Image: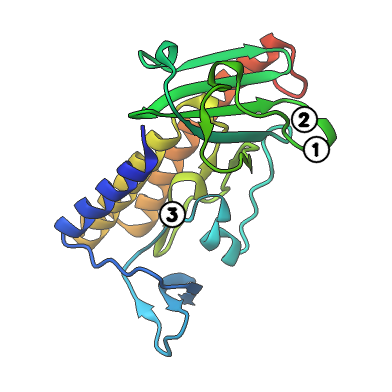
């Protein structure tokens, strides 16, 4: 899926649903009063933005959990990916994505748009602490879209995914490497679940502590199930530090 199109679609749907979208705002720190998050401070604004609930969707930056002093120790060996995009034609990849795995890691390729392809490589033990290599052979004849990029995708799970006045969603709450294939799904479902629970609290159907407990259990159980399945697969490949 082309993430640029998906992001634009989600933003448009949010506006249609009545969300006030503020672009270019820099979030400073959360407003914490009586142990609850009651708003955020925006850069350049004297008065804080008051809100019933703050949902952190800042991904690997983990803005809110860092601000609240919640650490998320790695739950895996260090995992680095290298990825990029290329333009052209690769008929063998047009029908379906492909992932190939071996003892040293895995490579994923897919068509994400008309004449546009994405590749990704994860090495279990990257050379000199960095992921290596460029596009796989099947995309070697295509035109790269800019330089390849890298990302740390070591597994993490926030020890508290919700509390008084706040939730963490998507990669801000739990991060697995892309082989789990649940990253976008978990991001969408966690945002939807946090929003639904917030509505339940506002409507009096749920207590805040009850909603936080439900959300934390739901997120933790799903992530730990994915971690167990991935650990078993990686251990079968001979990767160290899993299972």
> Alpha carbon of mark 1 to alpha carbon of mark 3: how far?
28 Å
The disc label shown at residue 57, or none: 3
Whether the residues at callouts 3 and 2 have beta carbons within 8 Å, the answer is no
User: Does 227 appear above or below 209?
Assistant: above
Label ID, residue 129: 1
**Which is nearer the eye, 42 or 76?**
42
> Residue reaching furthest right?
128
Q: Nearer the viewer, mark 1 or mark 3?
A: 1
Residue 66: name its quadrant. bottom right
Label 2's element? loop
**Which label's residue is closer to the chain start, 3 or 2?**
3
Decide which of 93, 54 is in the foreground and name it.
93
Check the image and report above or below for 103 versus 34. above
Circles 1 and 3 in contact, beta carbons < 8 Å: no
In this view, the mark in front (3 or 2): 2
Residue 226 is at least partly visible in this image = no
Per the image, the residue denoted by label 2 is 126
Query: Contact (CB < 8 A) between labels 2 and 1?
Result: yes
Label 1 residue SS: helix
Quadrant of image for the N terminus: top left
Viewer-nearest residue: 159 or 100: 100
């Amino acid at each position: 899926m082309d993430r640029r199109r998906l992001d634009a679609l989600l933003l448009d749907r949010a506006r249609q649903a009545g969300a006030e979208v503020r672009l270019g705002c820099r979030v400073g720190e959360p407003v914490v009063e009586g142990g609850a998050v009651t708003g955020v401070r925006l850069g350049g604004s004297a008065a804080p933005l008051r809100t019933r609930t703050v949902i952190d969707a800042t991904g690997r930056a983990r803005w809110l959990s860092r601000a609240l002093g919640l650490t998320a120790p790695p739950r895996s060996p260090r995992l680095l990916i290298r990825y990029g995009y290329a333009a052209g034609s690769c008929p063998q990849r047009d029908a379906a994505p492909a992932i190939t795995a071996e003892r040293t890691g895995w490579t994923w390729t897919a068509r994400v748009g008309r004449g546009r392809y994405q590749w990704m490589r994860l090495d279990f033990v990257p050379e000199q602490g960095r992921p290596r290599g460029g596009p796989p052979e099947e995309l070697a004849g295509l035109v790269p879209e800019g330089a390849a990029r890298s990302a740390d995708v070591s597994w993490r799970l926030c020890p508290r995914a919700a509390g008084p006045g706040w939730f963490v969603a998507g990669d801000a709450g739990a991060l697995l490497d892309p082989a789990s294939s649940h990253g976008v799904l978990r991001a969408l479902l966690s945002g939807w679940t946090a929003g639904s629970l917030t509505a339940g609290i506002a409507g009096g159907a749920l207590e805040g502590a009850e909603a936080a407990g439900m959300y934390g259990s739901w997120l933790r159980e799903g992530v730990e199930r994915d971690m167990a399945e991935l650990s078993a697969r990686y251990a079968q490949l001979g990767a160290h530090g899993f299972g």
